[in-house]
Image (cartoon, rainbow, N blue to C red):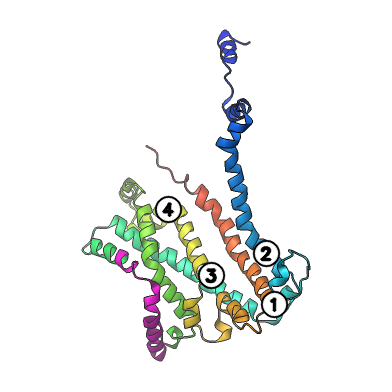
Amino acid sequence: MTTSTDRAGSRRGTAAPGTGQQVLRHRMKPGRWARELGWRHVVGVLAVLYAVFPIVYVVSASLSPTGTLTGSNELFAQVSGVNYAELGDTKFWTWMGNTLVIGVATAVGTVLMGAAAAYAFSRFRFAGRRLGLTSLLIIQMFPQMLAFVAIFLLLISLGEVVPALGLNSKLALICVYLGGALGVNTFLMYGFFNTVPRELDEAAKIDGASHAQVYWTIILRLVTPILAVVALLSFISTFGEFIIARVVLQSESNWTLAVGLYGWVSSLLEANWGLFAAGAVLSAIPVLALFLFLQKYIVGGLTAGSVKG
C-alpha cells in the first residue's frame, strides 16, 4: 500500500538512487548536457583512438607481405601470415625464451628482495636504519647511464673468477637488473608496509608466532596489491629493456627480444619491418597476459585483509 509519505515524495520528483543520473540527463537541455558532460565522452573516444591507432598500424604491418612500413599506409590492404611463418626460421623463439626467463626471474627476485628489505625498514629499529633509507633515496637520483661503464668493467673482472657472472651471461644480467631495481621498489613497498597495523604483529607474537611466520603468513598476504604491482612493473621493464642487455649479452643465442628485434632493422638496407612488426605483436602477448592475470590481485587485493576494529 502506498503511504502518504511515498505519494508526497513522488510529487516532489524523487527517484531511486540508480536512476538519478538518468533523470538529471533528461532534465538537462541538450546544449547544457553537451557542455557539462558530452565533451568528456568526446575526449574519451579521441584518447582511445589515439592509443589504439599505433597498435592497429603495427598489426597491419605484421600482416603485410611486402616487409615494409610504407605498405601499411592503407591498413590491411594486404593480409598474409608470411611474416609470422618466417619467425620459425629465425631465433625469435630462442629470444622469447631468454626474455621470459630473465623477466620472470627478475620479477620474482625483485619481489622477494624488496619485500624483505621493506619489512625490515618498516618493522625493525636498528642502527643505520635512517641512513640506509636516505642512501637508497640518494642513489636513485643518479641516472643509470652513469653505471654502464662500471657494470661492464665489473662483469669482465667477475668473469675471470666466476664465468657464470661474467659478460654474455643471463645470470649476470639478472643480477644487474635486481641491483638496479632494489632501491626504488624498497621505497615503494616501505610505504605500503607502514599501512599494515602493527597490532597484527603483536597479536601474532602473543600467539607464539615468530618473525618469519608473521612475515610469510600474515604480512605478505595483506600487501598482495603492492607485490603484484612491483612484479608487473619489474617484468615489463626488463622485458623491453635494451641498453644493458645489449652491453651484457654478446652472443646472438643469448639475446633478449629487444636486442634481437633491433638487429632485424638496424641495417637500413636489409631492414625487414614486416618481420619486426610480427615479432613485436607476439612479444606483447606475455605482458598483456601477465597484466590480465595480476589485475584481480591489484584490484581485489585492495579490499582484502581488512582488520576488525
Amino acid marked by disc 2: Tyr
Amino acid type indicated by mark 1: Leu
**Mark 1 Cα within 10 Å, few/some/many (few <14, many 20+)?**
some
Q: Residue at x 74, y 71 (%)?
A: 64
Labels 4 and 2: the sequence-earlier one? 2
Q: Residue furthest bottom?
A: 160
The image position of residue 56, as x and y in percent, is 68, 61
| Earlier sequence position, callout 2 versus callout 1 | 2
Q: Amino acid at mark 4?
A: Val
Labels 4 & 3 near each other (Cβ < 8 A): no
Q: Earlier in the sequence, mark 4 or mark 3?
A: 4
Q: Which residue is mark 4?
A: 223
Say if the magenta span includes residue 146.
Answer: yes
Find disc 2 in the rendering and name its residue.
57
Label number found at residue 87: 1
| Residue depicted at x 39% and y 58% | 188
Q: How many marks?
A: 4
The N terminus is located in which quarter? Answer: top right
Locate residue 273, reporting x and y percent.
67, 75
Q: Nearer the viewer, residue 198 or 153?
A: 153
How far across and down, in percent of the image, does residue 59 sit? 69, 65
Distance, label 4 to label 3, CA atoms, is: 24 Å
Measured from the top left, where is residue 237 in percent x and y?
A: 49, 67
Q: Magenta stretch containing residue 55, yes or no?
A: no
Where's the C terminus, which quadrant? top left
Alpha carbon of mark 4 to alpha carbon of mark 2: how far? 39 Å
Mark positioned earlier in the residue sequence (4 or 1): 1
Disc 2 and disc 3: Cα gap in Å?
22 Å
The numbered dot on residue 239 is: 3
Instruction: Estimate how packed mark 3 is, as few (under 14), some (14 to 19) or many (20 or more) residues with alpha carbons within 10 Å.
Output: many
Q: What residue do we see at 55% from left, 51% from top?
A: 296
**Observer-nearest of 144 and 39:** 39
